Amino acid sequence: MSRRNKKQVFTNIEVLDAGAKGKTIAKSPEGAVIFLPNAVPGDVVDIQTYKKRKAYYEGKATIFHKLSDKRTTPECEHFGVCGGCKWQDMDYKWQLHYKQKETENNLRRLGHIELPEVTPILGSAEQYFYRNKMEFSFSDSRWLTLEEIQSDVNLEDKNALGFHIPGMWDKILDINKCHLQADPSNAIRNAVRAFAVENDLEFFNTRNQTGLLRTLMIRTASTGELMILIQFFKEDKEKRELLLNYLAETFPKITSLLYVVNTKANDTIYDQEIVCFNGRDHIFEEMEGLKFKINAKSFYQTNSDQAYELYKLTREFSGLTGEELVYDLYTGTGTIAQFVAKNAKKVVGVEAVPDAILAAKENAKANNIDNVDFYVGDMKNVFNAQFIKTHGHPDVIITDPPRDGMHKDVVQMLLNVSPEKIVYVSCNSATQARDLALMDAVYRVTRIQAVDMFPQTHHVENIVLLEKR
């Protein structure tokens, strides 16, 4: 196809399905797949394509002739621009339907796995205001809508505190109200923005690497505790203390008020020194009487209520009687390990991040759990025959790897160890399917349970129980 014909318009096309990465699927009159970011299955639309690949198009719905009965009205005023909650215009029962469908399709088509009867996906009781952690970025050159550009409104204030526009690393959408994190999240963000503007605190410019204020992180906990972290690009003691004192005085319920001065080109804080300005340097999350210490760098499931459901199902799938030696691979801060410990003889957790293992040990000690041990190291190097010889042969292995799934050497070691049961928790059913295919000759899938941790998005967790054939 010549260059000038790569962009095409297709008219009166029905949107057929939802696919990977939150996009929906239509087909051209010739049968070519078209991926769309802004339609719902059941819509009938005109499509302008903007990319042509060998096997598919990427396009956008430009005219809607018929709206799907699967639609609902988005709650958020920023929907369609922000890009953070791409499925807000789809009724929640249909979100669950397509998440379940994708999970099953990945296991069957990518993994070629024979599946048992699949349990319906576990939906979230809360479809909004469910996240316990949010990160917002400052910018002195906010994203302007087409309406703003074409209007006569004074655009002198171009400061923003919000989210990156999808695909634009230097453009930030100023957020008025976000529906992902409960109060006082919106009140704090809006107060910080207003105070910074009133007091001439410079918002960051990503391209020029100038300004003072970089990011704002807000963490809430089911215990009611609250953590705020302000990231500054440079040290300016007077302005820094002005903002931090304002926050401490205006929001006295802040448990942990932190800051970091980060002069790097990127705003990651994992190699930075976090300074406690007021209160504690941590907050506590709680689950079934267990307390978990959360600091600024800690990983903790961002939907606390659904994390509890996920962990209960993981424990149930494990079928522990109190006599088992359990390995918890990719243990993070040891949350699952401690959650199942009361049902096991002993739990051994392994994780690559040293700080996470320190937190796991500290939490286990604080929770008076003495039948867990934690070890640090790259999984493919640590999890080997010597490790098994040293720590004992596991009866059950729980594995909760990152999105990329498990390294092939880890999968092979699982087959070598050959425990009676493996419980595989995944946030990416495609890589989970790949790993399951490698174990299919030895293990059969006996239970599957998808869990929706992230309503209004396409993301979904999936738990699989593997038992020896």
Image (tube, helix red, strand yellow):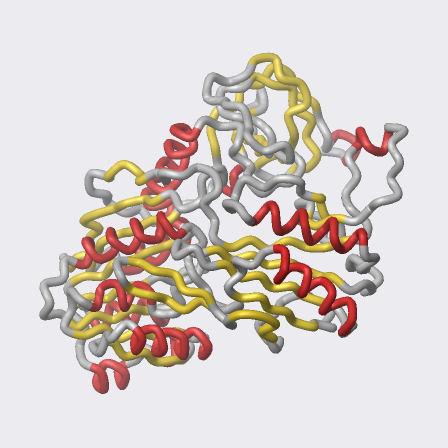
Q: Residue at x 51, y 55 (%)?
A: 133
User: Is residue 273 depicted above or below 445 in this figure?
Assistant: below
**In the rendered image, is residue 205 in sight?**
no
2 over 165 or under it: above or below: above
Q: Residue at x 28, y 68 (%)?
A: 337
The residue lying toward the viewer, choosing from 449 and 405, is 449
* Residue 19, placed above or below residue 14: below
Q: Is residue 268 left or right of residue 17?
A: right
Q: Residue 184 at what x, y percent from top left?
A: 55, 48
Of the 4 image quadrants, the one containing the C terminus is bottom left
All told, the count of numbered labels is 0
Q: Nearer the viewer, residue 373 or 387?
A: 373
Comparing 197 with 17, the one in front is: 197
Report x, y in % for residue 346: 18, 74
Q: Mark yes or no: residue 439 visible.
A: yes
State the image coordinates of residue 428 (x, y, percent, origin top left): 42, 51
Q: Residue at x 77, y 67 (%)?
A: 239
Q: Quadrant of residue 11?
A: top right
* Residue drawn at (68%, 37%) of the image: 51
- Image coordinates for residue 308, horizontal then vertical, percent: 31, 53
Locate residue 253 relative to residue 351 in the image: left or right.
right
Q: Front-most of 60 and 170? A: 170
Q: Quadrant of the N terminus?
A: top right
Instruction: Specify the quadrant of the image occupied by residue 467.
Output: bottom left
